[in-house]
Amino acid sequence: MLKNFRAVRLLLLLPLTFFVFGFRPPLNEEEKMQIIMVNTKNILSYLHYSPKPINDAYSKEVYKQYFESIDPTKTYFLQSDMDEFRKYETKLDDYLNTGDLTFYKLTVDKLYQRIDEIDKMTKDIFSKPINLEEDEILTLEPKLKNAPANKQQQYNEWRKYVKYNILQEIESINRKSEEKKKEDSNNKENTSKPEVLSQDEKIKKATENVKDLLEEKFIRFRKRQKMDWFTVYINAYTHIFDPHTNYYSPQGKKDFDMDFKGKIIGIGAVIQEKKGNLYIGTLSIGAPAWKTKQLTEGDKILKIKSTPDTDPVNVVDMLSSEAIKLIRGEKGTPITLTVQKKDGTIQDVTIIREEISIEDTFAKSIIINASDKKYGLINLPKFNADFEDKDGRNASDDIKKEIIKLKEQNIQGIVLDLRGNSGGSLTEVGDIMGLFMDAGPYVQVKDGNGKITTLKNKNEVPIWNGPLVILQNELSASAAEILAGVMQDYGRAVIMGSPVSYGKGTVQVFVDLNRFLNTEEDFGSIKLTIQKYYRITGESTQRKGVSSDIQMKDIFSYADIGEKYDDYALAWDKIQGTSFNKQNFLNIQALQKVSAERIAKNDNYKLLLEYAQWKENLGKEKTVPLSIQKYSDLMKQRKTQDDKFKVLKTLESGLTFTMYPKDIEREKNDAAFKNKSEVWIKNLQKDLYLQEAINIVEDLEVRS
């Protein structure tokens, strides 16, 4: 959860102002990294909610976290490398204090060396016959593995890794072939003969595909900037303080801001990367690239002229992320792409950058038809906000518009879907709460000094007083948990979904590093945990989350998802509750009883839970056979098991959905919007949780 930085600016006045004096701008990238390290350490020590001592014990934790990030599968570094690195295990605290890059440079240089060697090994593996008949086992679980003892063992592990990928690719070819046969059999007008490959042809095709994929993987690896690895390194230090305190490079912060605000300045085209070349992907209808009528999907990008005053940059062999930096810029400025069309002709296309909305960020709604009545579903992906633009979009304004649209359709109740909502702006919670109920406190926050502040919604004119159900799951976090928790505490809504939500009960702000340095150069930012938040009852959601009133396990309920599974998450605690007036006294026990009776009769729900457990167990398998026969037998066994769950792909909840007239009209001219709408509705029609949510809304109607 994020707060507007201005609200906590006083935290940053002292003792960090002394950083400015005597500052000398860095002469190179290494000096810049050193400055980032020292200032990160100072910010963590002075401003973090719960500072940790920077000592040898801390160093050991950083060491462990770093290698879990840089080589999680224990495939790149040899045991001799790890023995060499171990000498530094208790020195990382000292390096953070002084900005010493010795360990970082040692590990990253060694990583690039090993990648070059593994690339050569892989080429050698593909140059020889690969025996898919040999009976071998590949260990998948990193905890059961050690770093390769020597290069021969590493070679053997990569050979098995290559075999595994080939076997997976063969299985993919078989699956696609079966799907094509089924599709053709259902299409009577299709008279073409399907391609039939022999087993040898499948093996050859799969081997070539895997070879291409691995070649591309190594190319991308070498193109990765050293600053990207430095970000991984410095975040090993920050993660030990808590999992939500992170360093963001300048580009990383820009990407975060664009995602948070739901808008970018660009041309409105997906940039695809394939075999070292960049291509134009899907064009957004109405966006600048589309409006030129000169670009089409599949055009190869050769050069990018970012501004009229700069030379074109050759982007062949460039990472898509680097090319996107050139494409984005100031609103209203021109950019020229040199592209090669599919017919081989070369063309320069000049485009004027515009502000483009990322619609998947914003709230949307649809009308649900059930029992001869209308209900409303509002989906909120994030608590988005734009702190810098007074005309920018935010979640509360968007939800208000959706409620008004639904009320015009005479709906009888609303389901607010917060499943998968990872949070966002803290202030948006209070504003959204005010759309559904009268003014009152909605959250308490406590800083590292123990000071407690109660935040209140001051809106006295709610626009929806009718039945309300809030859907959540294990991925509903932070701001989503505050809203669900406070609506539960007031009795304003029934919370339904997974037994508990994610369990993130901390507040973060972004601290720009160059705010403490006498320079205009961007050194990146620290997303810093400065507070914990508490429900108005005094209960923290940290680690424990919000418990649903109506509990229905889902696909995530058997996985290790949530704050409680992170070793460095802050602890749960409780403070004194604040005074508030309960607005409704819902008979939750009665609702639970009738819901439990319905759920107990729902065979599809039982099957879904069985499927969830099966999938989770598959994910925990520690080894896999590598002979083609045994692997094929394993896949057949899984397919037999999977066939049992096929009904879940076609089940119908019994709900029907009606789009707004404006959206129906938009579908006629916007193919991308039409496709997204069709996929959304198709998924909603299979949504057992939404089905039960509507049942709960109907139960609330009866009891109101």
Image (spheres, rainbow, N blue to C red):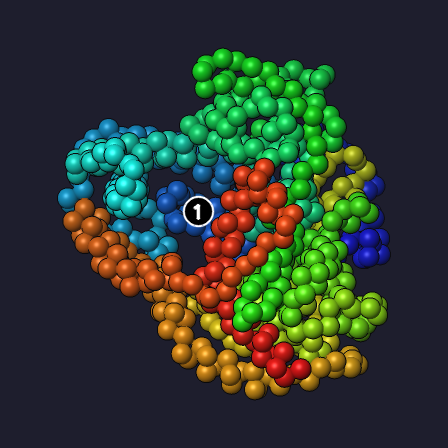
Q: Secondary structure at mark 1?
A: loop
> Residue 503, can we see it?
no
The quadrant of the rendering that contains the N terminus is: bottom right
Say if 342 sits above or below 671 in the image: above
Say if 33 sits above or below 549 in the image: above
Q: Position of residue 431 (x, y in %)?
A: 77, 63
Question: In the rendered image, which quarter is residue 649 located in?
Answer: bottom left
Q: Is residue 459 left or right of residue 203?
A: right
Q: Position of residue 332 (x, y in %)?
A: 75, 28
The one nearer the camera, 2 or 250, is 2
Residue denoted by label 1? 71
The one nearer the camera, 74 or 524, is 524
- For this orientation, the residue located farthest to the front is 372
Question: In the rendered image, which quarter is residue 644 located in?
Answer: bottom left
Residue at (65% x, 55% y) in the render: 363
Residue at (78% x, 80% y) in the render: 580
Q: Is residue 183 left or right of residue 678?
A: left
Q: Position of residue 613 (x, y in %)?
A: 37, 67
> Residue 588, can we see it?
yes
Query: Given the image, on which type of amino acid does mark 1 rest?
Result: Asp
